[in-house]
Image (spheres, coloured by chain):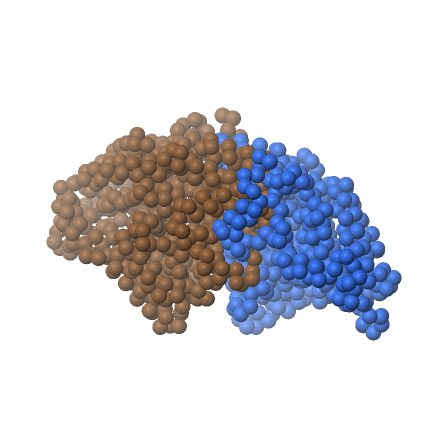
Chain colours: A brown, B blue
Amino acid sequence: MSEERLEKKKTIELRKKHVGPSCKIFFSHDPIKIVRAKGQYMYDEKGQRYLDCINNVAHVGHCHPDVVKAGAEQMEQLNTNSRFLHDNLVLYAQRLQATLPDKLSVCYFVNSGSEANDLALRLAWQYTGHKDVITLDNAYHGHVSSLIDISPYKFHQLSGVEKNQSVHVAPSPDVYRGKYRVDHPDPATAYADEVQEMIHKVQEKGGKIAAFIAESLQSCGGQVIPPAGYYQQVAEHVRKAGGVFIADEVQVGFGRVGTHFWAFQLQGEDFVPDIVTMGKPIGNGHPMSCVVTTKEVAEAFMQTGMEYFNTFGGNPVSCAIGLAVLDVIVKEDLQGNALRVGRYLTNLLEKQKEKHPLVGDIRGRGLFVGVELVKDRLKLTPATAEAQEVIYKLKEQHILLSADGPHRNVLKFKPPLCFSTEDADLAVGHIDNILTELEVALGLTLHNTLNVENENSKRKLPTEENGHQYPSELAHSNGSSQGVPQQTKQTKQAKRLKT
Amino acid sequence: MSEERLEKKKTIELRKKHVGPSCKIFFSHDPIKIVRAKGQYMYDEKGQRYLDCINNVAHVGHCHPDVVKAGAEQMEQLNTNSRFLHDNLVLYAQRLQATLPDKLSVCYFVNSGSEANDLALRLAWQYTGHKDVITLDNAYHGHVSSLIDISPYKFHQLSGVEKNQSVHVAPSPDVYRGKYRVDHPDPATAYADEVQEMIHKVQEKGGKIAAFIAESLQSCGGQVIPPAGYYQQVAEHVRKAGGVFIADEVQVGFGRVGTHFWAFQLQGEDFVPDIVTMGKPIGNGHPMSCVVTTKEVAEAFMQTGMEYFNTFGGNPVSCAIGLAVLDVIVKEDLQGNALRVGRYLTNLLEKQKEKHPLVGDIRGRGLFVGVELVKDRLKLTPATAEAQEVIYKLKEQHILLSADGPHRNVLKFKPPLCFSTEDADLAVGHIDNILTELEVALGLTLHNTLNVENENSKRKLPTEENGHQYPSELAHSNGSSQGVPQQTKQTKQAKRLKT
């Protein structure tokens, strides 16, 4: 095909030679070469179509013609820095602002979610005059050095590296697997109290809180939906300590959650962060992003006297693309589609949970959905290898899904917002089949787990109450054509699969 | 005009309301609204043409049709992340590598010069296991927090902020105004010895050198051309201490210096950095950049086990654009043009130096040229207000130039590489007129400075040897229609003019 310029073997060979080996590829033992894409579909060099359930960057659909046209036309006319006046910049800032609470009125345009979160930290440090930052366990906020420091998802991988002493990790507000669960009378308050306690400890040691930062819904951390009211209480504690609240919308913003344009708005009208950072979906793949904050924070940042200049940030092409993305979201009611298809998908998956013991939890908002696989609904033993097996088998069926979370056992749906109910049917149908095969291999049946599950959703049972032992994975490895040893091998290769 | 969607007044009003006040604009009292650009020319909303002497980002010329076409076509086809195989990524990596010494063979694609320099630090820290970084005085390496720490150009502006204890600032190898000058028998060794001494001091205090980082030619720091052989000696000292040499080519790479594709190559064939970072010109305005390093450094970075993923970095659109930029540089012999027109421009400016006492120094390579203005060629008193006056007067003539350096007295030429000898004539002609007017106002004449200059180029004269007193600026402020008070006012407004 004309889109392919090299044989796949040659592409792989050159990549090994000239691209940093830390830059991982999906399905490294048999990677996919994608040459074109449209909507929610990607196509390989042989013309094979893949259903894309993971690319939240291609927010309004791959290669959306309106976005391409806006970018191409502006590229022809002008692409320069923001030291000259340009209407695209101010019109885009105005449009973005209109999606946010009034208080969040000042924009800084940058090139990536990482640049946005780093700037958010700089704003917080400068505004508060404080240094300490509270982040959530399993959080991922970006790849520049200051953000590795506040991303336990990343720095937990490093052994023997000194943790930044002014970074403090609060428990992830995960009501399925976390410290306080659905059976807790008030997990929002319980998790917020943890933050308050952490603040007190920091202060006792002479620290001063600059910011609390959290993804409005944790993505890499395992598609975690914090209990409603949690952020309000955290914000109160943090502000009392002189800090600010940074909501990281890089993964989940721009209508993905369906009911709201921003995921932080799920917490209620009474919650307004001090700083919001954006990224991935903002330009449908074009490298751009934004930080929005209050006038007070922006003015304090200016008081340093230090200019903020970002060479590419806010250039007319990026802003034209950003405007086109906002237009398409409205024109095609993609937020509404996220809500409708998201509900449809979640319902389908709930039925899978009723049917498959491996499905421990379904959680999501709009087209941001997590399916947590467990080998034991009581002990919540992560079904890590099984999650990888699902991903690999789906790939064979030409469906792209990924698994993430601290145990890599959470299947992540975050497709382009044009995802349809038919797409949901297709994906879940295949998942159903794969899970059935896996459960046969593992000897997991529904009746020996569901009762426990019903109890467990109300309170934590001690292991003894259940009594029975699940057959071990290995004991059944020979009884299935899938073969668990194969899974293990694949798992190792797929270990770093994520988006 | 159709390209203008808002009245200029409205654009300014919205910008004040919705764009961070730290994001400065050129000529803030009367900013320019640019609506289109082509080659080395930019056009305002009234169709007025400006000659662009400063946009080194629009490297192959604003809106180059080949680059626009490559970007537009690829945007239509596919724009996704580097976890899928794509030929553009590997072909581009191969092409970039071919411009560099063999040893520099592994690429990491990112979105900005800042992301590139931050990653360079991460690579250096990981490879060496050390933490301390040596940077040059007046250096600027980017806007993310780790780079503010190593950018004296930035952090010198902050009062009362704690300097990062593992960052050490060596003297800028400026042979005009620096510690060792043209009259020194061996300034390269003298400046390199300063670095060696700094390394010893760091080690005595228990520090360990991870990296020395420098722009191959300092840009914001005042268009400084280090003496040949300096980097070789520095690299030897730094490597002996277990550190690496990072060459920051963000401002000066991709053929700008004329004789070579990379500015670090000016130091000689025997100099190869361990890490090279790229930025601004790489995508002719498209947000992209790259870090290239050795196999050894890349493998050490992988040993952490931590994946490096950059959402937008190395996407097929960025790589298509990057490839098109490389093609145009070759096809239009822009490196050759930089050499020819750069020499022509430098010769013109040298004649200005012979004619105008305000011109203290002309330095440059290819189309990267600095004109340092001084009020006194003996004392090197920076002609800061005068430099701003030149910039403002040039703007009135529709010529865009900027002034930078620690004293904001160095006029910076770094135009698109399609800059012509006619453009050089036009710009220098206007500079000539403006300098003449300024010198009349200041009472500066050639005969009372040139003799000193001739002496001074060989050795430093004590003030007494010259004897005469230059008339003060203020004494002459009433004798000219320009009026110095006006200059002072403008200077204040223009204080942050830079690119």
Name the residue rendered at 36%, 54% in the picture. A272
Name the residue rendered at 53%, 55% in the picture. B21
Q: Where is residue A455 in the image (x, y as percent from the top left)?
A: 14, 50
| Numbered disc total | 0
Above or below: residue B285 compared with residue A50: below
* Residue A127 visible in rendering: yes
Q: Residue furthest bottom?
A: B464
Is B364 left or right of B164, judged from the image as shown? right
Q: Position of residue A344 (x, y in %)?
A: 26, 36
The quadrant of the rendering that contains the N terminus of chain B is top right
Q: Where is residue B62 in the image (x, y as percent from the top left)?
A: 63, 39
Which quadrant would residue B459 be assigned to in this image? bottom right
Which quadrant would residue B217 be assigned to in this image? bottom right
Above or below: residue A498 compared with residue B218: above
Q: Position of residue B152 (x, y in %)?
A: 60, 62
Above or below: residue A238 compared with residue A387: below
Is B317 left or right of B190, judged from the image as shown? left
Is A86 left or right of B222, judged from the image as shown? left
Q: Nearer the viewer, residue A171 or A498?
A: A171
Which quadrant would residue A135 be assigned to in this image? bottom left
Q: Nearer the viewer, residue A267 or A7?
A: A267
Name the residue rendered at 36%, 46% in the picture. A262
Name the residue rendered at 44%, 45% in the picture. A96
Q: Nearer the viewer, residue B78 or B496?
A: B496
Is B207 left or right of B263, judged from the image as shown? left
* Residue B212 visible in rendering: no
